[in-house]
Amino acid sequence: MESRRSFLKIAGISALGAGMHPTLNAFASGGSDEGSKAVVKRNKEALTAVRWGMVIDTRKFHSEKDLEPIIKACDKIHNIPEFENKDHEIKWIWGEEFKHAFPEKDSEFLPDKVHHISFPVLCNHCENPPCVRACPTKATFKREDGIVLMDFHRCIGCRFCMAACPYGSRSFNFRDPRPFIPEDNKNQEFPTRMKGVVEKCNFCAERLAVGKLPACVEASNGAIAFGDLDDPASDVRKLLSANYTIQRKQALGTEPSVFYIV
Amino acid sequence: MSNNKKIYDKGIVFTGLVIFLALITFPFWYNRGIAAPAPEPELTEKAKAAKECVLPADEMKTGHMQLLNDWRNDVVRNADRMYVNEHGKEFNMSLSNECLDCHSSKEDFCDRCHNYASVKPYCWDCHIDNPKEKM
């Protein structure tokens, strides 16, 4: 009898002790070596938003020529290679015909102008990005500020994301791109990519981090606006409320963050 | 059965054993005394003048790969690009633009130990190893 009683006592105290363990640990770790710890933080000048978005005023583009400086600025800043073979092409921002950019909006009697200009297209940084769902390694992910980014370190080159993206915004490095980066059009401060990874537009996340607007926006002479879609007072929201805009392949429900004034 | 255990072809067996042992220990006695000394990475003037790296030198020696891995995640995933070490010194978390700003010679700094330890980090497949000069 006595031994059962003492067994229950000990068992009860042990259970209590085991239950206390995490609490004690929390107390023990709190308030130890605070103050002299290294910290990681955002740059003071970094631009931030709840959801970054872009409004492209296509009325300001009259021919393919108008797109050239924009594409060139992006290519230079991101060390984008130039391949002879179109199958190997790497594209971050490029020109597309209306019927390819907006296939469901093409109709028989559109104004001539629509068929003659080249529409700048890029990664839409979708609100519901299908590429993120497809990526098996979480190399592609959606950042808190809405930018769909890639961690090239983690990309295994499976190209599921390319199959998932309805906009063809992603390119695969079939060859080592470094020897094909034009000598006069490169940026020493930005990494190149390696053979076997996918790449795409990153909304110039590396420029936003140091307080600069994306390269295409800077090179567009005001044709491209960039800002926070969540802020009703932002430039993009003002443009969106003042103009009728379209998104690419809206019916798919990816909710692109890039809008076009046609 | 006899108690008289006997090894047949004693001579051949023991010669064979000696040759076998000699061959299998070959790398040990062949390399005795000629082991390459541990390399001393060469610091640039700028790195010497700075005296201290992001972390104390011995922590950097053992843990720079872990630090770079953490930096990568912070920069790419969280957009946190500023590292403030325990002395309050700020660093831009970038391999090419910050680490290589002081340690500007990859050959004299990174490669020395990496070659010695026979590790082949693939950093340089993408990150530009001498940002000030050529690609």
Image (tube, coloured by chain):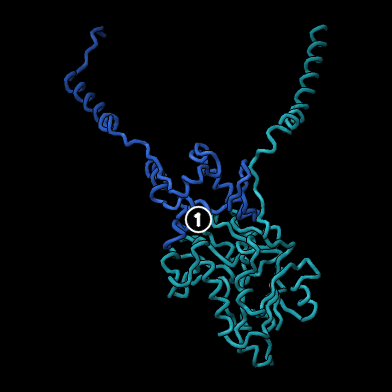
Chain colours: A cyan, B blue
User: Dot 1 corresponds to which residue?
Assistant: B96
Task: Report x, y in % for residue A176.
Answer: 43, 63
Can you say whether A238 is above or below B96 in the image?
below
Q: Chain of mark 1?
A: B
User: Which residue occupies 74% across, 79% down?
Assistant: A245
User: Which residue occupies 55% across, 80% down?
Assistant: A68
Can you say whether A184 is above or below A207 in the image?
below
Task: Report x, y in % for residue A163.
Answer: 58, 66
User: Which residue occupies 18% across, 18% down?
Assistant: B10
Outermost residue on the front side: it is B49
Task: Report x, y in % for residue A54.
Answer: 69, 72
Element under disc 1: helix
**Quadrant containing the C terminus of chain A in the rendered view:** bottom right
Query: Within 10 Å of the Cα at label 1, are there few (<14), some (14-19), or many (20+) other Cα atoms?
Result: many
Q: How many numbered discs sit on the rendered protein?
A: 1
Depth order, front residue of A113/A226:
A226
Task: Report x, y in % for residue B102.
Answer: 48, 51
Depth order, front residue of A161/A21:
A21
Residue A107 visible within the image: yes
**Quadrant containing the N terminus of chain A in the rendered view:** top right
Can you say whether B101 is above or below A255 in the image?
above
Depth order, front residue of A4/A56:
A56
Can you say whether B73 is above or below A81 in the image?
above
Taking A242 as reference, is B26 left or right?
left
User: Which residue occupies 73% across, 62% down?
Assistant: A49
Which three-letter amino acid code belongs to the residue tagged 1? Answer: Ser
Residue A164 visible within the image: no
